[in-house]
């Protein structure tokens, strides 16, 4: 699943969009934080740097302050980059 931050959808009045926005700079949905912390080897974060409609710097800030900052310490590195290294066989 591809979840999104609030910067991807500044106007989240649409119900379908609202369900996909799971974090922003100042919040993260509790049910997602619990799920990620329960299965930290199954999640990773990334950005859509090719999309000119998305502010890359804002998106990185949302990932760091909104999502990663709310995870358990043991989950943060896995979700931030270690899972990507493993999945893409970069080690």
Image: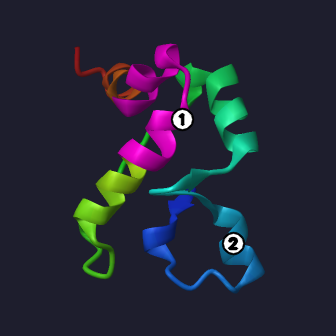
Q: Report whether residue 47 is seen.
A: no
Please tell me how crowded label 2 is: few (under 14), some (14-19), or many (20+) other residues with Cα within 10 Å: some
- Nearer the observer: mark 2 or 1; the answer is 1
Tag 2 secondary structure: helix
Q: In which quarter of the view is residue 62 placed?
A: bottom left
Please tell me how crowded label 1 is: few (under 14), some (14-19), or many (20+) other residues with Cα within 10 Å: some
Q: Residue at x 24, y 69 (%)?
A: 50
Q: Is residue 74 above or below residue 40?
A: above
Disc 2 or 1, which lies upstream in sequence? Answer: 2
Report the magenta stretch's main SS.
helix
Q: Which of 58/49 is in front?
A: 58
Range covered by the magenta-colored residues: 64-80
Residue 9 percent location from the top left of the image: 51, 77
> Quick check: marks 2 and 1 in contact, CB under 8 Å?
no
Residue 47 percent location from the top left of the image: 34, 55
Q: In which quarter of the view is residue 51 placed?
A: bottom left
Q: Which residue is mark 1?
A: 70
Residue 24 percent location from the top left of the image: 50, 59
Q: Which mark is residue 18?
A: 2
Residues at marks 2 and 1, CA–CA distance in whole angstroms: 20 Å
Q: Which of 2/88 is in front?
A: 2
Q: Is residue 48 above or below residue 85?
A: below
Q: In which quarter of the view is residue 88 placed?
A: top left
Q: Residue at x 41, y 46 (%)?
A: 65
Residue 23 lies in magenta, yes or no?
no
């Amino acid at each position: 699943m591809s979840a999104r931050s609030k910067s991807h959808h500044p106007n989240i009045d649409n119900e379908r969009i609202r369900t996909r926005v799971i974090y922003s700079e100042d919040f993260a949905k509790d049910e997602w934080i619990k799920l990620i912390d329960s299965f930290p080897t199954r999640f990773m974060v990334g950005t859509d740097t090719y999309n000119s409609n998305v502010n890359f710097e804002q998106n990185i800030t949302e990932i760091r302050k909104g999502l990663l900052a709310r995870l358990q310490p043991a989950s943060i590195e896995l979700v931030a980059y270690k899972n990507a290294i493993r999945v893409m066989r970069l080690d």
